[in-house]
Image (cartoon, grey):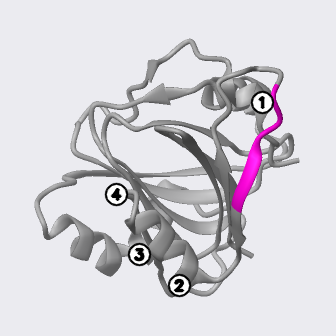
Amino acid sequence: MTRLSLYRDSASANAAATTLLESDDPNVIALALAERGLGYERWPVKPELPAAADQTAVLAAYAAEIAQVQGSGTYPTVDAIRLGPDHPDRAALRQKFLSEHTHSEDEVRFFVEGRGLFVIHLEGEVLQVLCETGDFLRVPSGTRHWFDMGSAPQFTAIRFFDNPAGWVAEFTGDGIASRYPLLD
């Protein structure tokens, strides 16, 4: 189930985070994120994809939804990422995504299957958004954030980019991610 946990950001690495809001209500989540300039929607999902479905099959299954998003002209590049618990690079990828970073473009994801924890660091707040199947999330460019796919990842996500190079991160060097709960 999708869940939002909103914390007051503590400037001290030793201070416990203060919980301001917790909700699994999609309307509450959408409103709280919108008030902070983030986008969240629930999309219908297709029947389960075959275990062997590759990027081409994932993109084909959601061609109409992709066309709708790309119709704005903002996100001309799209791909799909599918990670399972047996992925050989899962530990290295997890560590990379767990480091706080920004992008010069929006980070836009639609969770086709599985789940992942997006953590957004705003002025004075940290928002943990547990994204599940059917969640569409838009994090504006320049927003500090990190992502936890868990130690045994199991997700498929469609990623939208306005940069043909795809995912390009600028790491902040801030160790804040270590002060908040992980996915597992």
Please provide percent x and percent y for residue 146: 58, 36
Mark 2 residue crowding within 10 angstroms, few (<14) / some (14–19) / many (20+): few
**Callout 2: helix, strand or loop?**
helix
Task: Name the residue at 34% across, 57% down.
Answer: 37
In the image, 153 versus 172, the foreground residue is: 172
Give the left or right position of residue 75, taking residue 24 as reference: left
The residue beneath circle 3 is: 62
Q: Which residue is mark 4?
A: 37
Question: Toward the viewer: 86 or 178?
Answer: 178
Dot in front, 3 or 2: 2
Say whether marks 3 and 4 touch (CB < 8 Å): no
Q: Earlier in the sequence, mark 4 or mark 1?
A: 4
Can residue 88 be seen here? The reply is: no
- Tag 2: residue type? Asn
Would you identify the image quadrant in which residue 46 lies? bottom right
Query: Badge 1 is on which residue?
Result: 179
Label 2 vs label 1: CA separation?
A: 28 Å
Can residue 154 be seen here? The reply is yes
Disc 1 marks a residue whose amino acid type is Arg
Q: Amino acid at mark 3?
A: Tyr
Kindly indicate the quadrant of the structure image that contains residue 75: bottom left
Question: Which circle marks residue 27 in the picture?
Answer: 2
First-in-chain label (3 vs 4): 4
Mark 2 or 1, nearer chain start: 2
Side (left or right) of 89 relative to 57? right
Magenta-highlighted residues = 15-20
User: Looking at the image, which residue is at 68% across and 72% down?
Assistant: 2
Mark earlier in primary sequence (1, 3) = 3
